[in-house]
Amino acid sequence: MMTVSQKSLLDGDAAITAYARTEQCILVSHSNGFHSNSNTNKNKIRKSEKTMKFNTEKTDDVTIIEIPVDSLDAGNVIEFKNGIAPILDRCDYVVFDMGRVKFIDSSGIGAILSCLRKLHSQDGALSMFGVKEQVLQLFKLVRIDRIITVHPTKTDAIKALQDALPGS
């Protein structure tokens, strides 16, 4: 899992924020934009090649995917996308088990919305269950709960998608 630490520095009139990643890539943000200092490439920021591992379960035509992290944020969203993409290529109706997720930021929400767009392009659907109260409050604040149905239980989420299947 990639970790991110943040340090703010003052350089004359400009504030500089440095982010150190465990992948030996350092990003520095200031008024002139982002710069990187990497051991392998001095001019480009490396995207993570790691992928997140997911537990999946199939019930009829519905695939249940357990989100395996406590936090879905900018620090691990690339691994999330790399790991979930091949799964979404093989299924159209997906239920996310959000039981472990205690925190999500805008990058995590964007990744979930990318999954929804992918499934909609395949005439599929996405729902979720096990959403912690603090995450649910954020979903309501940004109105994600209006486009992705959040169910209280796994059984409810599966049944809702099975009812939405063509020919049901």
Image (cartoon, rainbow, N blue to C red):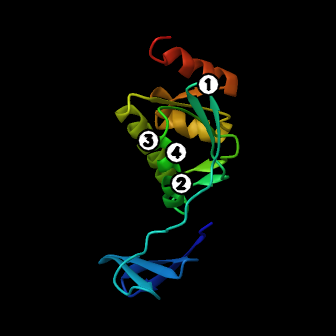
> Badge 4, how many Cα within 10 Å: few under 14, some, many 20+?
some
- Which secondary structure lies at badge 1? helix
Q: Position of residue 26 (x, y in %)?
A: 48, 81
Q: Amino acid at mark 3?
A: Leu
Q: Amino acid at mark 2?
A: Gly
* Furthest-top residue in this view: 168
**Earlier residue among tags 4 and 1:** 4
**Earlier residue among tags 3 and 1:** 3
**Earlier residue among tags 2 and 3:** 2
Q: Are marks 3 and 1 in contact (CB under 8 Å)?
A: no
What is the total number of numbered labels drawn onto the structure image? 4
Residue at coordinates 36% horizontally, 79% vertically from top-left?
Answer: 44
Instruction: Left or right? Give the position of 164 relative to 135.
Output: left
**Earlier residue among tags 1 and 2:** 2
Residue at coordinates 55% horizontally, 60% vertically from top-left?
Answer: 51
Q: Amino acid at mark 1?
A: Ala
Residue on which disc 3 sits: 113
Instruction: Left or right? Give the position of 69 relative to 13.
Output: right
Residues at marks 4 and 1, CA–CA distance in whole angstroms: 18 Å
Residue on which disc 2 sits: 83
Q: Are marks 2 and 4 in contact (CB under 8 Å)?
A: yes
Residues at marks 3 and 1, CA–CA distance in whole angstroms: 18 Å
